[in-house]
Amino acid sequence: MKIRVRFSKQGMMKFIGHLDMVRYFQKVHRRADLDVVYSEGFSPHQKMSFASPLSVGLLSRGEYYDLEVASSMSSKEMIQRMNEQNVEGVEVLSFKLLPDGAKNCMSIVAAADYLVHGNFNAEKVQDFLSQKEIQVLKKTKKSEKIVDIRPMIYEMNTTDEGLYMKVAQGSAANLKPDLVIRSLFDFMNEEVPGNIVYERLDMYCLEGEQLISLDAVGEEIIKH
């Protein structure tokens, strides 16, 4: 059985890195007595695959990983079991059975949306978006190059809480929210405030030409 787990990461847990989160959930699975499937070979490990890793320092309401289990109780029961073992700042939000042949979440992520907490000028944001091109210097581990990020910004608007954006994410194109914010403040000839807080809201995959939440794939396990 392939399961997709959605969880939130809040508070001080934003400082815990991706690899530590993988190890953290492996322990939660054992303590919650999940019937997890292990790989074969000299060093067996739990069969799990995370979607796009969250950068250290970011909050999230929509993190995902896929997990293989040999058997399962109802989704409600499994969520309760896991949350009883979770520390403050981590909460399992959904536990869904994936259909046969479903691709793992890491390979299908195409977009993510973020809330950037802070005060933003709606008019300046729209002026920024109205540019035909937004060229930035994008650095990777191996190189630096000028990239037009405008096609990778799908939505962007101000809200009561801050700035909402939906951007490309995944293997085909990957745009980090802090790069968008740096570009926005460069455009406004202002320094990026030091108190900005980033929060990932959800991740999306493509179904046809439409972006749908990773949480929309699969169904809850109901047992009476």
Image (cartoon, grey):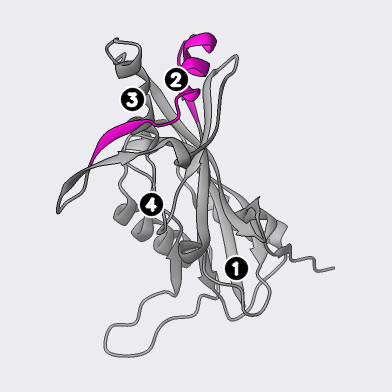
- Report x, y in % for residue 215: 64, 54
Asked whether the residues under the numbered discs 3 and 2 touch, taking CB atoms below 8 Å apart as contact, a structural biologist would say: yes
Q: Looking at numbered disc 3 in the image, what kind of residue is underneath it?
A: Ser
Judged by depth in the image, the label closer to the viewer, 1 or 3, is: 3
Asked whether the residues under the numbered discs 1 and 4 touch, taking CB atoms below 8 Å apart as contact, a structural biologist would say: no
Give the residue number, with chain letter if any, for mark 3. Answer: 183
The residues bearing labels 1 and 2 have C-alpha atoms spaced at a distance of 41 Å
For disc 4, the neighbor class at 10 Å (few under 14, some 14 to 19, many from 20) is some
Task: Specify the farthest residue to the left.
Answer: 142
Q: Which of 43 and 212 is in front in this view?
A: 212
The region drawn magenta spans 115-138
The residues bearing labels 4 and 2 have C-alpha atoms spaced at a distance of 28 Å
In the rendered view, does 108 fall on the left or right side of 187? right
Judged by depth in the image, the label closer to the viewer, 3 or 4, is: 3
Residue 167 showing in the rendered view: yes
Q: Looking at numbered disc 4 in the image, what kind of residue is underneath it?
A: Pro
**Residue depicted at x 42% and y 29%:** 198
The residues bearing labels 1 and 4 have C-alpha atoms spaced at a distance of 18 Å
Q: Looking at numbered disc 2 in the image, what kind of residue is underneath it?
A: Phe
Res. 3 mark: 1
Res. 128 mark: 2
As helix, strand or loop, the secondary structure at mark 2 comes to helix
For disc 1, the neighbor class at 10 Å (few under 14, some 14 to 19, many from 20) is many
Give the residue number, with chain letter if any, for mark 4. Answer: 53
- Report x, y in % for residue 30: 46, 67
As helix, strand or loop, the secondary structure at mark 1 comes to strand
Q: Earlier in the sequence, mark 3 or mark 2?
A: 2
The residues bearing labels 1 and 3 have C-alpha atoms spaced at a distance of 38 Å
As helix, strand or loop, the secondary structure at mark 4 comes to loop
Q: Looking at numbered disc 1 in the image, what kind of residue is underneath it?
A: Ile
Is 17 in the magenta? no
Q: Please state, as top left, top right, bottom left or bottom right, where the C terminus lies in the image.
A: bottom right
